[in-house]
């Protein structure tokens, strides 16, 4: 199976779906001639033309609202929000329109819109370009929340998102773009609400998302040398969330650590732990959370590194559950 970068896997999914379905269009800032702020849309403008790959003005409320209207009118728009941090100026279009129109039509109107956006820190991009924030959208009814961590998952989940008749938000961590992995050339889908066990283990379950899956894998590799066996579960989608796979893993290990680069307050870490506790799983130790504290992401490299989760913080949390 050929190896491809996370970025190329997304590009390939977009290209193959545009070939398959002429109603699929792309909209956003710099997605056309420039090939995307992070180079993901590449040469799609040259292949499909400006009618299907549309550069938009710098007005998130306008082009996300335009995407919502296009979806309600029979197209399948893939709209790019350059950074998730910019959602505020288009929140009405996201949570009051895109998320609710299918419900408010009594199911008569399909709403096949995908909103792609980037997340994540570590680039010294400061407080307005470094957040994760997907928990905000998982909180809202009517939004499916997709968070891939590997090139294979990125392609399969995006194809599923484009073919879905509901509104999907698709989150791409910027640190994942250059990461390589095996990806089939042919189109394929990965169902929503099905977590993936990235690594099997016996002593502790680590649930991690997006780039934190890779930090958790590093921690697990180092702890294996100390005789600690770590199982890593990647939910892949937060809405819907595959509680059964997480619970099954924790029932086996008896310990739980949840890792998330999003803010710790009222976030995915608390939701996942609550679901496990509500199932009555017998834990050998209190569950642990490793997440970003409730502070703006600093520009200072030293301060940013201090607040973001990493393999050393994950190792510490795992060891605390092993005491």
Image (tube, helix red, strand yellow):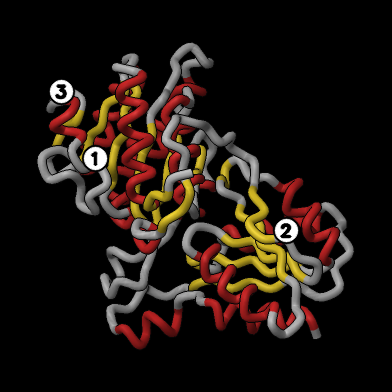
Relative to 151, is 52 above or below? above
Kindly report the distance in space between the C-alpha atoms of the residues bearing marks 2 and 1.
35 Å
Q: Which residue is mark 1?
A: 61
- Give SS at disc 1: helix
Residue 271 shows in the view = no
Along the horizontal axis of the image, is 222 left or right of 82? right
- Mark 3: few/some/many CA within 10 Å (<14, 14-19, 20+): few
- Mark 1: few/some/many CA within 10 Å (<14, 14-19, 20+): some
> What's the residue at 29%, 54% (across, down)?
83
- Give SS at disc 2: helix
Q: Which residue is mark 3?
A: 51
Kindly report the distance in space between the C-alpha atoms of the residues bearing marks 2 and 3.
47 Å
**Which comes before the other along the chain, label 2 or label 1?**
1
Relative to 184, is 202 above or below? below
> What's the residue at 28%, 46% (across, down)?
81
**Which comes before the other along the chain, label 2 or label 3?**
3
Q: Nearer the viewer, residue 259 or 231?
A: 231
Where residue 86 appears, as percent x and y from the top left, is 28, 53
The quarter of the displayed image where residue 27 is located: top left
Where residue 320 appears, as percent x and y from the top left, is 73, 83
Where residue 256 appears, as percent x and y from the top left, is 74, 67
Along the horizontal axis of the image, is 309 left or right of 12? right
Pointer 2 with pointer 1, Cβ within 8 A: no
> What's the residue at 35%, 73% (across, down)?
122
> What's the residue at 25%, 32% (across, down)?
26
Point out which mark residue 274 bears.
2
Q: Nearer the viewer, mark 1 or mark 3?
A: 3
- Give SS at disc 3: loop
**Which comes before the other along the chain, label 1 or label 3?**
3
Q: Nearer the viewer, residue 22 or 164?
A: 22
Where residue 200 appears, as percent x and y from the top left, is 72, 60
Task: Name the quarter where the C terminus is drawn.
Answer: bottom right
């Amino acid at each position: 199976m050929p190896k491809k970068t996370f970025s190329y896997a997304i590009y390939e999914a977009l290209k193959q779906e545009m070939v398959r379905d002429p109603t699929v269009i792309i909209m956003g800032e710099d997605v056309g001639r420039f090939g995307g702020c992070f180079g993901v849309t590449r040469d799609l403008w040259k292949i499909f033309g400006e009618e299907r790959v549309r550069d938009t003005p710098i007005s998130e409320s306008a082009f996300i609202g335009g995407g919502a209207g296009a979806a309600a009118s029979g197209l399948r728009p893939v709209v790019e929000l350059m950074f998730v941090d910019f959602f505020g100026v288009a929140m009405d279009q996201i949570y009051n329109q895109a998320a609710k129109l299918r419900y408010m039509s009594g199911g008569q109107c399909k709403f096949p819109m995908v909103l792609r956006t980037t997340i994540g820190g570590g680039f010294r991009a400061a407080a307005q370009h470094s957040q994760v924030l997907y928990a905000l959208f998982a909180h809202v009814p009517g939004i499916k929340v997709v968070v891939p961590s590997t090139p294979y998952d990125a392609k399969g989940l995006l194809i599923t998102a484009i073919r879905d008749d509901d509104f999907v938000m698709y989150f791409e961590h910027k640190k994942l773009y250059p990461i390589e992995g095996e990806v089939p050339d042919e189109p394929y889908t990965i169902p929503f609400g099905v977590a993936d066990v990235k690594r099997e283990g016996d002593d502790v379950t680590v649930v991690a998302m997006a780039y934190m899956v890779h930090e958790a894998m590093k921690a697990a590799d180092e702890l294996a040398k100390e005789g600690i066996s770590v199982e890593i579960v990647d939910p892949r989608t937060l809405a819907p969330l595959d509680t059964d796979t997480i619970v099954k893993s924790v029932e086996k290990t008896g310990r739980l650590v949840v890792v998330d680069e999003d803010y710790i307050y009222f976030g995915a870490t608390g939701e996942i732990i609550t679901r496990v506790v509500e199932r009555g799983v017998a834990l050998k130790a209190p569950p642990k959370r490793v997440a970003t504290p409730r502070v703006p992401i600093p520009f200072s490299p030293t301060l940013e590194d201090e607040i973001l989760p990493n393999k050393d913080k994950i190792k510490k949390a795992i060891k605390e559950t092993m005491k």
